[in-house]
Amino acid sequence: MSAGRDMKGDRSVENEAAFEKFKSCAVEVLQVPAEKITLDARFSDDLEADSLEVVELVMALEEAFDITVEETELEGVETIGQAFELVTSKI
Amino acid sequence: MSDGRVVLVTGGSRGIGLACARRLQADGYQVAITWKSEAPNALDGPEGSIPLLPVRCDVNSTAEIDRAFDEVEAALGNVEVLVCSAGITDDTLLLRMSEEKWARVIDTNLTAVFRATKRASARMVRARYGRIVLLSSVVAYLGSAGQTNYAASKAALVGFGRSLARELAGRNITVNVVAPGVVATDMIAGLPDDRIAALTQMVPLGRAAEPEEVANVVAWLAADASAYVTGAVIPVDGGLGMGH
């Protein structure tokens, strides 16, 4: 039981670190304050990101996390949370 | 004037590309040129200018284009001005044109521009600055018997360039197309004399352009001061294509 809890704990710590990294990419690329980068923030409405900024963010994330994101995987990704989930599924 | 900005000229080892490279070099830019078949020898420009950086590159290969950019970035920094001048002709009437002949010209003149601009624009977008100049041709809108492949590739650059101009406009990156007419380069020198005479006869200014005259317009577009010109197609053709 305790081992399970520890693992879960490690995962959430890792997740938190990953989100901080994700957030710093987003802040840099989208030029928005860090507090606006929340899981339910929408790229177009809340962050006023145009399509090129989203592409820039994806490229920055690919570099930061050493992952590759295919065009098709971006379909339907409209929020920070969805994008973060996509990134974490690859690391 | 140029702030020593970094330029890459594809096909910069001869013809119009070399003239562009030399002109930008004289204007104070740090200029790299790609070459494929013959390495350029005279790399020095006027006193006080920075020698040209020759980079071997087959523009038909994405890997080679990436490597060429890596080399330029390591030596000079990120490319801020990209001049796409690498191009070939392989003429014959459509009825005699093999698909290979077609594909080779399209790949070199069009797809290589896709490769180079894609590689360059990622850094330009990040830097919020860029100048991209594509060398098209008057043939793009006049048409030219025996050059369906070449004309198609050069016309395609207009649609490509204008679309890219729209995509990158918000990032202070301009994309423009220069459409030369008859220019005194090896490409023209390969034609029969009577064909050259017939071509120049059609030119209102009555002569072929010197490559430097095309380079002059490219240098103007490359300048910081030309920030408000994007998606333009500028003919440098002695009036040959007027009205199109």
Image (cartoon, coloured by chain):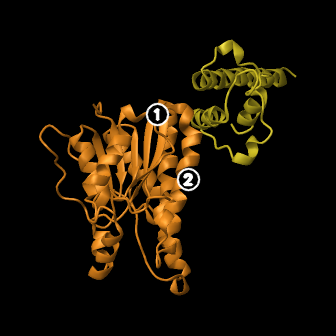
User: For this rendering, which residue is in front, B216 or A27?
Assistant: B216
| Residue drawn where x is 42% and y is 48% of the image | B133
Q: Where is residue B239 drawn, in percent x and y?
A: 37, 59
Chain letter of the residue beneath label 1 in the structure image:
B
Q: Specify the colour of chain A.
A: yellow
Q: Point out the tag, 1 or 2, that comes first from the N-terminus.
A: 2
Q: Where is residue B173 drawn, in percent x and y?
A: 48, 36
Chain in orange, by letter, is: B
Depicted A62 relative to depicted B22: above or below: above
Depicted B148 relative to depicted A44: above or below: below
Q: Where is residue B142 drawn, in percent x and y?
A: 48, 67
Q: CA distance from mark 1 to mark 2?
A: 19 Å
**Kind of residue at badge 2:** Phe
The numbered disc on residue B160 is: 2
User: For this rendering, which residue is in front, A54 or A48?
Assistant: A48
**Residue for badge 1:** B228
Depicted B1 relative to depicted A28: above or below: below
- Quarter the N terminus of chain B occupies: top left
Looking at the rendered structure, the number of numbered marks drawn on it comes to 2
Left or right of residue B119, residue A54 in this image: right
Mark 1 residue element: loop
| Residue drawn where x is 52% and y is 61% of the image | B155
Q: Badge 2 local density, few (<14 within 10 Å), some, or many (20+)?
A: some
